Structure formats: C-alpha cells, structure tokens
Amino acid sequence: MNFLGHLYVSGPEPLVIVGNFMGDEVKGRDLSHLHPSIQKGVRLHRAIDSFTDRHPLQRLGRSRVRPHAGRYAGVVMDMFYDHLLASDPHWWAETPLKEFAPRMYTLLTAHEAFMPEATRRMLRYMATHDWLTSYGTIEGIGGAIAGLARRVPQGTPMIGSEEVLQQHFSTYRAEFREFLPALQAHVTHLV
C-alpha cells in the first residue's frame, strides 16, 4: 500500500493518521520521542507494510510486474494498489475520494510540525499536485511511477509499468477486492 492506502485504513484519530503517513521516515524501534498517538500510527504503518509484503495476493501481483519493474516490483505493486483503491467506487460509498483527499491534506498540513522535514516537503508537493486523487487514473498512477523512478537509483525499469496493470486489470482488481478487507481485519486492533 502506498500513501492513499495507508491513509484509507488509518481510522479517525488525527495523530494516528499523521504517524501512519510519516511511518517510512521514522527509523528504529525506539519511538518514545514521539507523541503516543503518533507512535500508534507508526506501528500501524509498519503492520500494514509487513502484512502487505507477505500477503500471497501481493506476491502474485508482484510476479506479474517483476519482468517490467525488476527489483522495484513491490514498490510498483504498492502504487497499483493505490490506483485500484482510488479508481474503484466500491471503496468510496461513504466519502468520495474527491472529499477524502482534501480532508487528508488539511489534516496532515495542520499537524506537519510533528513530521520530519522530508515528509513535510513531500506533503506540500503531494497536496499541491493532488496525488491522492490523481492515483485514480492510469495516467496519474503512471506519472507517479515515473516520478518515483526518477528519484530512486536505477529506477528506470519502473517507467511504463502501469501497462502491466492495464493488461491484467480485472485480475488485479479482483485480487485487491480480496486483499483490502483482509488488511483491514488484520489492523483493526491498531486503529
């Protein structure tokens, strides 16, 4: 799961959402320097990542995209999952994505003092360019993948991997519709 997926399963508590959002930038086991709710969010982030990385459906999806994305197949799958979440009205019956995304940008910006500088910079760019909503289109997720490919060492093979998503779209969607409820059940005690 990428940014949208993490935010989607964060629950309602603002500082848990913040901790989950910034989880990649928090290193080490000792979280005692963080607000207790942010600690909870970081633990939630780690539980989501661990569950996702080990899940058989995610592994199956990675195997489809690996010939195109190479060692970044897992990262690309996380982005595919954000597209599958953003583009499927099934998940947005209560709150449409076009309402959810600005609410998240506002909440995160209001609490950016808790975030590492790298997360704050990324959040500003994310909100300005509305990444969360853009994930709902193939062009948007393709642009996000290409942008990431430019920022990581030897990331070029990722560019264009959204074509694999298009080729196997119904399979990926069916797998994701099975995966997300399993993830939500797995982390329900953490939110």
Image: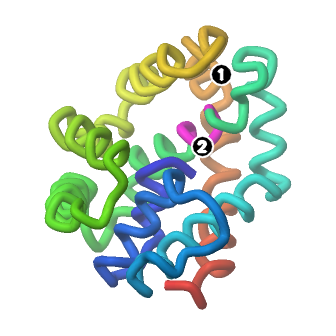
The amino acid sitting under disc 2 is Asp
Magenta stretch holds residue 52:
no
Camera-nearest residue between 22 and 130: 22
- Residue matched to label 2: 78
Q: Position of residue 62 (x, y in %)?
A: 77, 36
In the rendered structure, the answer to whether residue 152 lies left or right of residue 131 reads right
Q: Is residue 163 above or below residue 54?
A: above
Q: Position of residue 80 (x, y in %)?
A: 56, 38
Q: Position of residue 96 (x, y in %)?
A: 25, 60
Q: Are marks 2 and 1 in contact (CB under 8 Å)?
A: no
Question: What residue is rendered at 43% in x and 58% in y?
Answer: 22
- Residue matched to label 1: 164
The amino acid sitting under disc 1 is Val
Give the residues drawn in magenta, as a range. Answer: 76-80
Local SS, label 1: helix
Question: What residue is rendered at 66% in x and 51% in y?
Answer: 174
| Chosen colour scheme | rainbow
Q: Position of residue 40 (x, y in %)?
A: 50, 81
In the rendered structure, the answer to whether residue 175 lies left or right of residue 81 reads right
Q: Is residue 156 above or below residue 164?
A: above
Instruction: Give the label, 2 or 1, closer to the camera.
Output: 2
Question: What residue is rendered at 33% in x and 82% in y?
Answer: 12
**How far is disc 2 from disc 1 in space, using C-alphas?**
14 Å
Camera-nearest residue between 88 and 120: 120
Q: Is residue 66 above or below residue 91?
A: above
* Residue furthest bottom in the image: 189
